[in-house]
Image: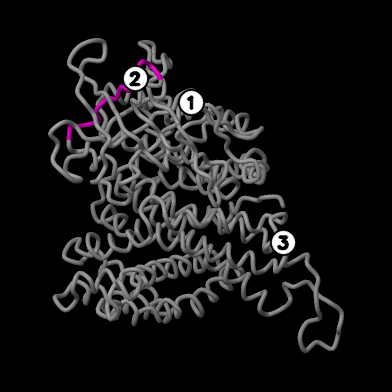
């Protein structure tokens, strides 16, 4: 089926949830006028529908292909990526000093959301590049910024993030890749990189002129664990004096994974410095200082976590559009209780209508949370400390709940199709398969929940969370379901911050607690949209969210406060036999 960008809802979310009109009053974002906002939203919608969406199916069925250390994409992807670069879609929020447009992060969020809804696996390519840009912009030297940022911002070069190793998954501190200082010769002052990284998204491909890997590694004598990690720039091709790609660096893709979904996105096993290319010399540049790599990498990961949360919205939107069309066109059975026994479109049946409206309420709620988060990020970049802290709190909510929404909505989408949803030919199953990675990468959703109850809950002695929930409760007095949920979340946050809750208790209740907080924020922002728009449709969707989804989330309070002892009545041997 054809894809149509949800432009109207995106513009509403940018204006109401992100407050982009207010952002445009600041000198830094003065170019983000209402006509520019609409032009970008409409333009990326047309581009995505015309260039990227038609490739979604072939990307799944043919996928990326590895051969002799190179990775190729199906026909059409090179042309589509070239058009992306030529039209400047990757430069929206890039620093103006290096060729970017300097527009709000909110607008870049809209671009990635639209592209990802059209083709989620393909959009991982520019998405990871965004993270590399942010890491180098915040932590790179002036020379590194000048050397790498212009081509990364334009999209001529792509970026990757290299953390995971076979023995070091979520425990990044266990990595073994080494970085040995070079004291003599043409690369003096740089480092020889040696090691293997796995699960590297778009680690090798032929769509960009160069691939700039950001690699975590250890220098000699570095402290154990995460305190001894440094970050290095490792380009696929060395950079000539004139800034063009030169000789091949000793970095190669030794294989790609065969996955459940996002098949067009090559998930690579990367070998650094194994002697195969360039005489066995894999050369990297240190970013910042030795043993401070995790700080720099978290800048990249924070960006990626927001954009992965967006992926939940993206794939939910695509599944919703397909399920809605199927429910409209599929005719089967008479309406229950109707004197007319003629079969009707299945959208007329109450349970199908419930599913479609649940899909829409979840999708639009997650989108509202996405753009509220983006707006807080933009205000943080303007120096608003309270907004920066609120954004930090929102990131795990968005990443975890947003991707949970993606999985639920795509699953419902299969259900709406009935047996045809289980058949690959309809495409509904692809959305379900593609969605499943998002709760796993860039920190599993369990890790997001742990981050919420350990690091984020403690910000300002709990004041950041309490202020957010107080804002929701105060503004939602006429929406009792959301107000009550916010008050319950605040109370649970107080309990978790007290001596009554052990660390295990917090962690055991972290996932349901995160869901409660996220749904409260989403319900709040949906209600604000409904008030601002006066739309009958938005009011109906918001009502479904308030009366079904918010009460479900409130019911998670018991699980959030159940404590850890409940889960340890059985010892590990009994539980796993």
Q: Which residue is mark 3?
A: 325
Coloured how?
Answer: one colour
Q: Which residue is mark 2?
A: 280
Magenta span includes 283: yes
User: Is there any visible trace of residue 357 in the rendered image?
Assistant: yes
Q: Which residues are magenta?
A: 277-290
- Would you say 321 lies left or right of 366 here? right
Mark 2 to mark 1 CA distance (whole Å): 27 Å
Residue 478 image position (x, y, % from top left):
43, 80
Does residue 240 sit above or below 563 in this rendering? above
- Mark 2 and mark 3: Cα distance apart in space: 55 Å
Find disc 1 in the rendering and name its residue: 156
**What secondary structure is found at the residue carrying circle 2?**
helix
Q: What crowding class fits label 1: few (fewer than 14 Cα within 10 Å), some (14-19), or many (20 or more)? A: some
**Where, quadrant-wise, is the C terminus in this rendering?**
bottom left
Rendered location of residue 29, percent (x, y) = 39, 41
């Amino acid at each position: 089926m054809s894809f149509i960008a949800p432009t109207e809802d995106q513009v509403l979310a940018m204006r109401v949830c992100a407050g982009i009109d207010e952002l445009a009053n600041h000198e830094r974002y003065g170019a983000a006028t209402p006509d520019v906002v609409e032009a970008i939203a409409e333009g990326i919608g047309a581009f995505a529908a015309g260039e990227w969406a038609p490739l979604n199916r072939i990307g799944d069925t043919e996928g990326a292909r590895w051969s002799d250390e190179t990775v190729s994409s199906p026909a059409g992807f090179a042309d589509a990526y070239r058009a992306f670069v030529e039209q400047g879609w990757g430069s929206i929020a890039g620093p103006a000093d290096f060729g970017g447009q300097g527009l709000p992060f909110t607008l870049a969020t809209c671009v990635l959301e639209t592209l990802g809804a059209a083709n989620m696996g393909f959009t991982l390519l520019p998405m990871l590049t965004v993270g590399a840009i942010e890491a180098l912009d915040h932590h790179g030297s002036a020379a590194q910024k000048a050397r790498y940022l212009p081509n990364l911002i334009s999209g001529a070069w792509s970026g990757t993030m290299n953390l995971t190793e076979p023995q070091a998954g979520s425990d990044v501190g266990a990595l073994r890749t080494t970085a040995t200082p070079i004291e003599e010769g043409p690369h003096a002052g740089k480092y020889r990189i040696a090691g293997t990284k796995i699960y590297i998204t778009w680690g090798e491909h032929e769509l960009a002129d160069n691939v700039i890997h950001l690699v975590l590694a250890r220098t000699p004598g570095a402290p154990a664990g995460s305190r001894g990690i440094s970050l290095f720039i490792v380009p696929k091709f060395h950079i000539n004096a004139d800034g063009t790609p030169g000789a091949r660096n000793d970095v190669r893709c030794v294989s790609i994974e065969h996955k459940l979904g996002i098949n067009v996105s090559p998930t690579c096993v990367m070998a650094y410095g194994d002697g195969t290319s360039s005489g066995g010399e894999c050369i990297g540049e240190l970013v910042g200082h030795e043993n401070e790599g995790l700080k720099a990498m978290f800048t990249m990961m924070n960006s990626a976590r927001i954009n992965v949360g967006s992926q939940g919205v993206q794939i939910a939107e695509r599944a919703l559009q397909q399920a809605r069309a199927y429910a409209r066109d599929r005719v089967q059975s008479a309406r229950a209780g109707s004197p007319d026994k003629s079969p009707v479109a299945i959208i007329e049946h109450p349970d199908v209508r419930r599913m479609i409206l649940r899909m829409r309420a979840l999708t639009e709620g997650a989108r509202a949370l996405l753009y509220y988060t983006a707006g807080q990020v933009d205000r943080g970049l303007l120096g608003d400390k309270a907004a920066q802290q609120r954004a930090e709190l929102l990131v795990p909510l968005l990443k975890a709940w947003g991707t949970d929404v993606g999985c639920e909505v795509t699953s419902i989408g299969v259900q709406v199709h009935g047996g045809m949803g289980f058949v690959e030919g309809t495409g509904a199953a692809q959305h379900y398969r593609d969605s499943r990675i998002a709760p796993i990468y860039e920190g599993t959703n369990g890790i997001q929940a742990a981050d919420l109850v350990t690091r984020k809950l403690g910000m300002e002695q709990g004041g950041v969370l309490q202020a957010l929930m107080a804002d929701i409760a105060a503004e939602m007095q006429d929406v009792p379901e959301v107000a009550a949920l916010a008050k319950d979340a605040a109370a649970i946050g107080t309990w978790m911050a007290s001596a009554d809750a052990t660390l295990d208790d917090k962690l055991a209740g972290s996932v349901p607690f995160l869901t409660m907080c996220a749904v409260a924020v989403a319900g709040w922002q949906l209600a604000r949209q409904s008030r601002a728009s006066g739309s009958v449709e938005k009011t109906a969707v918001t009502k479904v969210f308030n009366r079904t989804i918010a009460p479900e989330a409130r019911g998670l309070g018991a699980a959030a406060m159940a404590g850890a002892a409940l889960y340890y009545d059985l010892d590990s041997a009994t539980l796993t036999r």
